[in-house]
Amino acid sequence: MDKNKKMLSINNLSIHYITEEGTVAAVQDMNLEVAEGETLGLVGETGAGKTTTALGIMRLIPEPPGKIVQGEIVFQGKNLLDMTTEQMREIRGNKISMIFQDPMTSLNPVIPVGEQIAEVIILHQNVNAREALERAAEMLEKVGIPPERIKEYPHQFSGGMRQRVVIAIALACNPKLLIADEPTTALDVTIQAQVLKLMNNLKKEFNTSMIMITHDLGVVAEVCDKVAIMYAGNVIEYTDKKSLFTEPRHPYTLGLFGSIPSIEDDEERLNPIKGLMPDPTNIPSGCPFHPRCPKVMEICSEKVPKDTEVSKGHFVKCLLYEE
């Protein structure tokens, strides 16, 4: 495992949705890197552009209305945006896998779970149906489900079990990159902890890099090495986990931490961020956060902030830190 070797790098990526109401800039000028064996957390409110980023990496943006306007997504030295549909089919599920938010909509209700895991293995690995089912049983065991349940259907499993099946499908071909889109959202807290622990263990076992999409900073603390905070399609702060928790710099990131209850402080009220996320078809001029920012300056409504490196590897998109 080489934490210095780049697995994925996203350069100046912009993804827009062109609708009758107007153009939604879902992702704007994104720059990110994920090294081998590393976990990157993508954090932000609903509508920040997290899932669009994941679908962009998988080349699953619905076109129309979606369009990758500019940029490149380089995976293992090759730009995914230059690849043909056939080449992407080879990569999806084999080298890059995705765990979607809701396991019930990800699984086919009329096919036994074992066959659904085996399907991915047959598609990408040179094995027959019997060997694929044996591998599927092994994968079920790895995610903590008795292999004898291989012939059961999704409705016979609980929510947490279904999520484990989805993880088994995602990891069946030992992918190099796993994208997990809020994999614990629909689960209760104890099952959440089990699923996160399981994903951490399997990630180490398979030496997989991971992008964890979440709006929960507790999940970030648990599993991530680096974190990218997103707001209105922009990555506004990008650093390692320790720096984010000990020295958050962007006013929005500070606002996120301010809205989390603290065990030490005896506070009667939390400090939520004022206002709402902007309408995606009508993003404010200048810095998109300026209408809600407690440290707003006059220039913030006019000038778009650039990435500023405030300390080694710690990037912030904020005019407070520009020269």
Image (spheres, grey):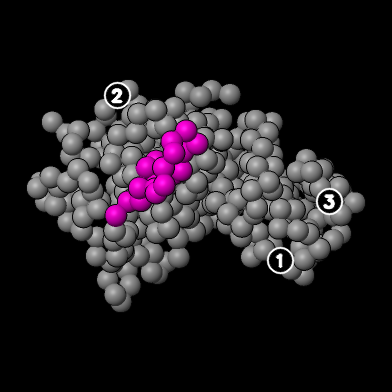
Q: Tell me the SS state at disc 3.
A: helix
Residue at screen point 64% across, 48% down: 189
**What amino acid type is highlighted by mark number 1?**
Asn
Q: Are marks 3 and 2 in contact (CB under 8 Å)?
A: no
**What amino acid type is highlighted by mark number 3?**
Leu
Left or right: 236 as drawn, with respect to 186: left
Marks 2/1: CA–CA distance: 48 Å
Left or right: 159 as drawn, with respect to 216: right
Between 120 and 87, the residue placed more toward the observer is 120
**Crowding near the residue tagged with mark 2, few <14, some 14–19, many ≥20 C-alpha atoms within 10 Å:** few
Q: Tell me the SS state at disc 2.
A: strand
Q: Quadrant of residue 306?
A: top left
Q: Can residue 119 be seen by looking at this rendering?
A: no
Q: Position of residue 207 (x, y in %)?
A: 63, 31
Q: Main secondary structure of the magenta part?
A: loop
The quadrant in which the N terminus is found is top right
- Sequence-wise, which precedes: disc 3 or disc 1? 1
Which tag is nearer the camera, tag 3 or tag 1? 1
Residue indicated by mark 2: 311
Q: Position of residue 82 (x, y in %)?
A: 42, 49
Residue indicated by mark 1: 108
Which numbered circle lies on residue 38?
none
Which tag is nearer the camera, tag 2 or tag 1? 2
Q: Quadrant of residue 154?
A: bottom right
- The answer to if 134 sits in the magenta stretch is no
Residue 313, above or below 61: above
Marks 3/2: CA–CA distance: 50 Å
- The answer to if 272 sits in the magenta stretch is yes
**What amino acid type is highlighted by mark number 2?**
Ser
The boundaries of the magenta stretch are 257-274
Left or right: 283 as drawn, with respect to 109: left
Residue at screen point 29% across, 65% down: 279
